[in-house]
Amino acid sequence: MADEPRQPTALALGAAIESGKLDPVDLVESCLSHIEDAGLQSAGFVRLTAQRARAEAAAAAARAAAGLRRSPLDGVPISWKDLFDTAGVLTEGGSPQHAGRTPPLDAVVLRRSREAGLVCIGKTLTVEFALGGIGTNPHFGTPANAAMTDVPRVPGGSSAGAAVSVAGGHVPIGIGTDTGGSVRIPAAWNRLVGFKTGIGAVPRDGVLPLSSTLDTVGPLCRTVADAGQMFAVLANDTPVDLAHARVAGLRLLAATNLVFDEADPEVASAMPAAVETLRQFGATVVEAEIPEFTDIHDLLQRHGGIVTAEGYVSCRHLIDGREAQIDPDVLARMEEGRAMSAVDFLTVRDASERLAGALARRLAGWDALIHPTLPILPPPLAQVTGDRAAYARANALALRNTRLGNVLRLAAITLPATDSLPVGITVARPADDNRILLRIAAAVEGALAD
């Protein structure tokens, strides 16, 4: 494991700016220098927006001096996955097929971030078309995992650069997208908090699409408090009050079926330890099978996935006739979507809606559902590079637990389950309960960090 001194949180940096102890201009220059020292790719970036960052930091400094800060995060640097339109800046979605794509306007969420005073540092690396849980990209490069450094390991995807930009200490917040786990996978594998917001809670205007049904936008950061504050910005909502959030009295349902299958020993042992800690802090935790998990997993295995089918529809104009130019690992999944029949797609989509309703009813008497975010630790890069079968197996395991939250319409947050290894614990609720989920996750975070 890497020696991991904890970096300042986004809210701590904002408080330092508020008190006059920190100048946003100095903070941005420090971030840019840190990224340059690490190397653009190693820091998780595909390109920086240094000119914009310096201008936004200077404006934030002026507001702070005048007592006119726009939010608690005014002047705080942030990174954006290379799916978010950024005015006048290349936004290429991890693919040479988007080469030269330069949008004239910011995505809605980036505009909201700017209006709240956050400083756009740059665009982060993503899997091509954002389709992949491992985090590799043969076109633009793959940043190594920032939390487990014994050998170069995968960062997780598809928001690979977003996670590394935060876990590497380059920025305190990265914004990613989550369609089958693309926020939670890299967050868990880099010992971060990752928030998969409920479908529709955050606008996707100006975000390169993958799945029109399942795409969501969410932050990767160090604490639930940072995630909650950033969610308020993205959703144009008031911040959730996380004060005095406590585990005592919570009723938590812990899934036992499917989510531990083929688990690494470190994951298998970390989860019972976390559950015991939550019980010691006064939570009622009941372990049980979740039939909806097995049912939807089996249907996806038999019929194919919503994401691959809709992903092919979204990207076919960039793929058909150009197959040799696409990442082979991504292309293999796109071809699965291309081959999926209408009957199979409708079977899975309808079952997803039906089982999501059944799971919501099952959870009605519980505060949250918990389970391991991933069953495995991040594999070595060398193990999945150039070996299609090894990549496919690792990718399937990486996505298996997280995609349950997408297709079953949950909002979900992953938190570090241990103080050492990159093992995540997921806390989830039905998708319209984002604010309640944040408070529950803050309580779980406090107990596990105590």
Image (cartoon, helix red, strand yellow):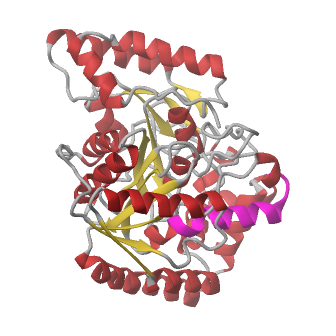
Q: Residue at x 56, y 86 (%)?
A: 299
Nearest the viewer among 36 and 262 is 262
Magenta span includes 399: yes
- In which image quadrant can residue 264 be found? bottom right
Q: Is residue 121 visible?
A: yes
Q: Which residue is at a point 40% across and 84% down the rendered structure image?
A: 355
Residue under the point 66% across and 54% down = 134
Q: Is residue 182 above or below residue 249?
A: above
Does the magenta segment cover residue 313?
no
Question: In the figure, 43 relative to 145: above or below?
Answer: above
Taking the spot 58% from the left edge, 85% from the top edge, the residue there is 298
Residue 104 image position (x, y, % from top left):
43, 35
Residue closest to the eye, 441 or 277: 277
Figure label count: 0
Does 259 appear above or below 64? below
For the N terminus, give its image quadrant.
top right
Frontmost residue, 357 versus 236: 357
Camera-nearest residue between 344 and 187 = 187
Q: In the figure, is residue 105 to the left or right of 190?
A: left
Q: Is residue 239 left or right of residue 172?
A: left
Magenta: predominant secondary structure element?
Answer: helix
Asked whether the viewer can see residue 320, the reply is no
Does 202 appear above or below 334?
Answer: above
Q: Which residues are magenta?
A: 385-402
What is the x, y in percent for residue 368? 31, 67
Quadrant containing the C terminus is top left
Q: Position of residue 309 (x, y in %)?
A: 58, 73
Q: Residue furthest left?
A: 67
Q: Residue furthest right?
A: 386
Left or right relative to 146: residue 358: left
